[in-house]
Image (spheres, grey):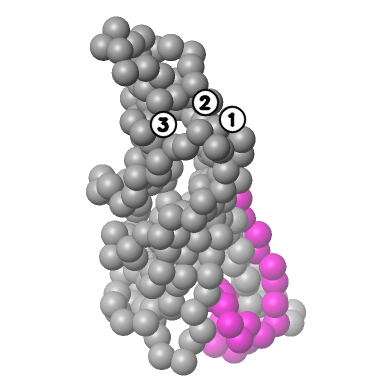
Amino acid sequence: AASAATAGLPATTVHLPFASLGAFDPLHLRGADDARTINAGVRLDRVVTGARLRLTYAYSPSLVFPMSHLKVSMNGEVVATVPFDATRAGRTVTQDIPIDPRYFSDFNQIGLRLIAHYTLDHCEDPSSSALWADVSPTSELILDESPVRLPNDLALLPAPFFDRRDNGLLRLPFVLPASPDSATLRSAGVLASWFGALADYRQARFPVAATLPADDQAVVVGTAAT
């Protein structure tokens, strides 16, 4: 695939709430050292030019704040340490954390690790109920993306029509002739079934059009005569 952004095509900003990435419920971090991971893909026809993590969270008011914090990692590399402080303890906090876009690949893991202490005593209980932080599913990964022109190569199939890196709903227009015959309809049905199976949990929609869309991919089904 081409690595340079396509000239003349607009960049976009994509908001990916944790709920859309599979974390439908709050991430409950418990104990002195606990971690969770969120998975996020970047489409083959996009390149990340800017990124930030908008984290919405709350933490225990019983923590020793100079020592307690949240570590944020990207694909195994620590990108930020979020300190806790007494003034915001027990309340919902929203904070933007910038992420270097060079950390991103096709498939990405966002790691959140709680490091928590409620006392400076060496006899601290690492499983104490006082050690907690909750991360809201409304937290989101915000990506600035530029389009990448893919080569016209059948080896890329099912891309660019379906991209397994994209967790969102598959919406793939089908362009059919005005009066399709049974063979054309059957072919369209086979293709739609294949793409629907690939979409799996993402679900799929296949709107029918008479002409190619100006700003979207589409599957054209027909014969040379139609």
Q: Are marks 1 and 2 in contact (CB under 8 Å)?
A: yes
Magenta part of the chain: 201-226
Tell me the tag on residue 90. 1
**Front label number (3 vs 1):** 3
Residue 187: percent from left, percent from top? 57, 66
Q: Is residue 83 above or below residue 7?
A: above
Q: Is residue 225 magenta?
A: yes
Indicate the quadrant where residue 211 lies.
Answer: bottom right
- Of 126 and 135, nearer the camera is 126
Q: Specify whether 20 is left or right of 46.
A: right
Determine whether the residue tagged by mark 1 lies in a helix, strand or loop.
Answer: loop
Q: Earlier in the sequence, mark 3 or mark 1?
A: 3
| Gap in angstroms between the C-alphas marked 3 and 1 | 13 Å
Residue at figure coordinates x 40%, y 41% from the top left: 83
Q: Which residue is mark 2?
A: 60
Q: Is residue 106 above or below residue 128?
A: below
Q: Earlier in the sequence, mark 1 or mark 2?
A: 2
Q: Is residue 138 visible?
A: yes
**Front label number (2 vs 3):** 3
Residue at figure coordinates x 35%, y 40% from the top left: 71
Q: Disc 2 marks which amino acid?
A: Ser
Residue at figure coordinates x 61%, y 86% from the top left: 214
Q: Specify whether 2 is left or right of 22.
A: left
Q: Is residue 194 visible?
A: no
- Of 166 and 21, nearer the camera is 21
Q: Is residue 174 above or below residue 170?
A: below
